[in-house]
Amino acid sequence: MRNVLVAALAVPVIAIVVARSVGQRPAARRLSVMVAVLAIGAIGAFASANPEPATGALPSRVEPLDPTAFTTEIQTSESPSAPVSISFPEAMNAASVEQMLRITPSTNVEVSWDATTTSATVTPLAAWQPGTYYTVTVLAGALDASGRPIERRIRAAFLTRPPITATVTAADLAGDEAKIATAFRVALSGPIDESTLDVTISPAVEGAILPDPESTALAPVYDFEPTEPLAPDTEYTVRLAQTVRDLDAAEVVATPLTIRTAAAPSLVRFRPRHGFTDVAWSQDLSVRFTEPMDHASTEAAWSATQGTTALTGAFSWAESDTVLVFDPASNLGYAQKVTLKVDVGAISQAGLPIQGASSITFTTASKPVPRAPSSSGGGGGGSIGGSTWAAVESYYLGLMNCTRTGGWVTSGGDCSSPGGRDVAALWQDPGITASVARPYAMKLAVNNLCTHFSGGNPGDRLRAAGYTSYTWAENLGCRSGDPYSAVLGTHLFYQSEVSYSGGHYVNLMNAKYDRVGLGVWASGGRVRLVVDFYHP
């Protein structure tokens, strides 16, 4: 009865609410009164009734699913094409779960269920991004099959494997530039779908993509081989096409290559220069190019002729293969006209022929008039700069020129059989003596040193004094006792190197040098001799 009463009492409340909603109009007010009367009558009728006792069961309460039944799963190195499965402890309402499903980062997916609706499979419509952390979340409130809600969210998290990467390089280089016949190499960190492989090049280049001999299944390598040589001195940009995919249909990551092809080589200059008339007959000959050159073709295109006679000699290369040096097998002679030429057969290391043939002509110097020695060759008296040991320097100059011109210095300091060798005697250069050789001899003697490299090399010391030629050499003597005896002993040692072409003897006899700086210094019983050979 109480329940019924409660139900009845509910009527006036509903009526009042309705009345309030429509009581703004007169007709509505009349309706509310009628509803109230009816309601009161209904109360009286129910109060006077004597119904049968009623029985019933309380409705069941909807409890949330146990949150401990759900855990977050984290997986790593997943394939970009792999589906993700989410398991539930109870059969689920599929539509409710799919409505509460969230993917981060946002990705288009499709969801499928097993027959029991306890396992959902989430599959990307394309592919997950490689090297990306994803979360698949079912929000709280999703319902199971009986209508019970999930009290808290459940989540699956996974990290996809790193992306397949591609490195694009030029296969054939000349220094930092590409050769015009180069292929472009694509090296991959993992297998790809070959049907998607493509390369784009700007400016456009026709060609074919072929597997490289170094290619393997796990680290494939491909070469794009142009149909025609590339244009010289042109910047190319090579990219892997954006459509390239790995075996999981994921995008391959690649950085474009931008590289310039080598320019056609041209000749910068010959040395000696065209028209020179005082070239030393011992001079090395050279030619400089704008590009690194192929040795064989360039040496074949080179010629040096003296009159109508082709000169023979040895080739060497310098400055990253941009300078060819020719050392004639014999001296050029005095007052001789020599022609140097590089023909069109010379090819750069990038495979480009030289732009045109070039030639020059020079004349060697006339035979020099012998110079008078700066002081007597014997022993006393001043000379260059008035050094205490200047006379010893002059004495040693005489010893050197004896051997150099074909004589032989005896153990007593005499010159036996002077002359006979067709080479000019060395002369003592005042500047090299005063600014280079003597100061260094003093440094060595005072500090008890015997080295070419205290504070730099001989070339450094010469350049600091304004002598910038690369044609130089240096001999040192480190002895003790009487300065004259010391330099004589040093010279006899140099002279003895003739049997095995020792370095000191070779410097002494080398016709490339026409002057020397001489420095002798004694300190604490130590005697140091410095001989700087030079040709401008």
Image (tube, rainbow, N blue to C red):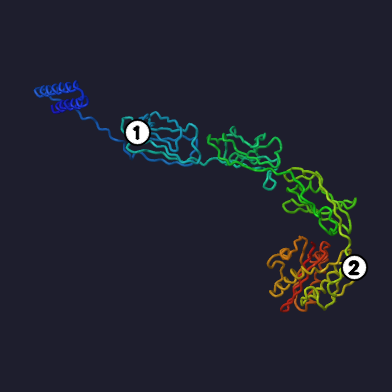
Helix, strand or loop at label 1? It is loop
Upstream in sequence: badge 1 or badge 2: 1
Between 333 and 406, which is closer to the camera in this rendering?
A: 333
Which residue is painted at 70% across and 39% down in the image? 231
The residue indicated by pointer 1 is 142
Residue 215 visible within the image: no
Q: Which quadrant would residue 143 be assigned to in this image?
A: top left
Where residue 503 sits in the image (x, y, percent)? 78, 64
Which residue is painted at 8% across and 23% down in the image? 48
How many numbered markers are drawn? 2
Between 112 and 282, which is closer to the camera in this rendering?
A: 282
Residue 186 vertical placement versus 532 (above, below) = above
Left/right of residue 75 with respect to residue 330 in the rendered view: left
Going by the numbered disc 1, the residue's amino acid type is Ala
Q: Quadrant of the C terminus?
A: bottom right
Between 148 and 263, which is closer to the camera in this rendering?
A: 263
Helix, strand or loop at label 2? It is loop
How far, Cα to Cα, is label 1 from label 2?
A: 114 Å
Between 478 and 114, which is closer to the camera in this rendering?
A: 478
Query: Quick one: label 2, few (<14), some, or many (20+) residues within 10 Å?
Result: some
Query: Quick one: label 1, few (<14), some, or many (20+) residues within 10 Å?
Result: many
Residue 173 vertical placement versus 535 (above, below) = above
Where residue 458 sits in the image (x, y, percent)? 73, 65
Going by the numbered disc 2, the residue's amino acid type is Gly
Left/right of residue 417 with respect to residue 29 in the rendered view: right
The residue indicated by pointer 2 is 419
Residue 166 visible within the image: yes
Q: Quadrant of the N terminus?
A: top left
Look at discs 1 and 2 and give the one toward the viewer: 2
